Image: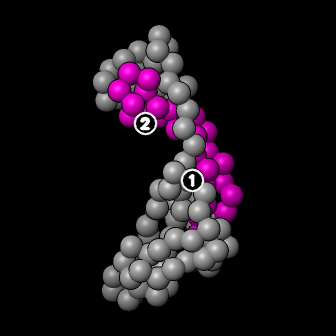
């Protein structure tokens, strides 16, 4: 378990074990955004996706896991507090793609 108590409600997670929920993180640097406004973004999704839209310029990045502007793809298993329902920790992370050398 990542933590002993929920950071949001304070419940003891040993006494009330959290459930697990899988999510996906995509690290994006959109090459179509103007250089002055270009930045690294981490886009969280509840499930694996085939396409992403850049929040800055709206460009469609597809396929999401192979597009050159998608630098990182991670599957994340979160711990979700059984008392309050908030994500209170990360149980494990699996990298599927990392072109950012661990920077995202």
Quadrant, the N terminus: top right
**Residue 100 on image: x %, y %:** 58, 67
- Residue 80 lies in magenta, yes or no? yes
Image side of residue 91 versus residue 36, left or right: right
Residue 25 marker: none
Tell me if I can see residue 83 in this picture.
yes
Q: Earlier in the sequence, mark 2 or mark 1?
A: 1
Determine the image quadrant of residue 82.
Answer: top left
- Neighbor class of circle 2 (other Cα within 10 Å; few <14, some 14-19, many 20+) is some
**Residue 25 on image: x %, y %:** 53, 56
63 and 39: which is toward the camera: 63
Q: Residue furthest left?
A: 9
Q: Residue furthest top?
A: 15
**Residue 38 on image: x %, y %:** 39, 80
Q: Residue at x 51, y 80 (%)?
A: 60
Q: Which residue is mark 2?
A: 87
SS type, badge 1: loop
Magenta highlight range:
69-97
33 and 18: which is toward the camera: 18
- Residue 67 lies in magenta, yes or no? no
**Is residue 20 depicted above or below 5 in this figure?**
below
SS type, badge 2: strand
Nearer to us of marks 2 and 1 is 1
Whole-angstrom CA distance, mark 2 to mark 1, is 16 Å
**Is residue 13 depicted above or below 85 in this figure?**
above
- Neighbor class of circle 1 (other Cα within 10 Å; few <14, some 14-19, many 20+) is few
Q: Residue at x 59, y 63 (%)?
A: 49
Q: Residue at x 38, y 89 (%)?
A: 34
Q: Residue at x 41, y 80 (%)?
A: 58
Tell me if I can see residue 38 in this picture.
no
Q: Which residue is mark 1?
A: 47
Kindly report the secondary structure that dominates the magenta region of the rendered protein: strand
């Amino acid at each position: 378990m990542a933590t002993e108590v929920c950071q949001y409600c304070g419940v003891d997670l040993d006494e009330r074990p959290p459930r697990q929920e899988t999510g996906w993180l995509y690290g994006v640097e959109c090459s179509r955004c103007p250089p002055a406004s270009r930045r690294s973004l981490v886009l969280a999704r509840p499930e694996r996706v085939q396409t992403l839209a850049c929040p800055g310029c709206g460009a469609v990045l597809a396929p999401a896991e192979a597009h050159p502007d998608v630098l990182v793809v991670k599957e994340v298993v979160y711990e979700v507090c059984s008392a309050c329902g908030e994500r209170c920790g990360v149980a494990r992370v699996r990298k599927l793609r990392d072109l950012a050398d661990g920077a995202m």
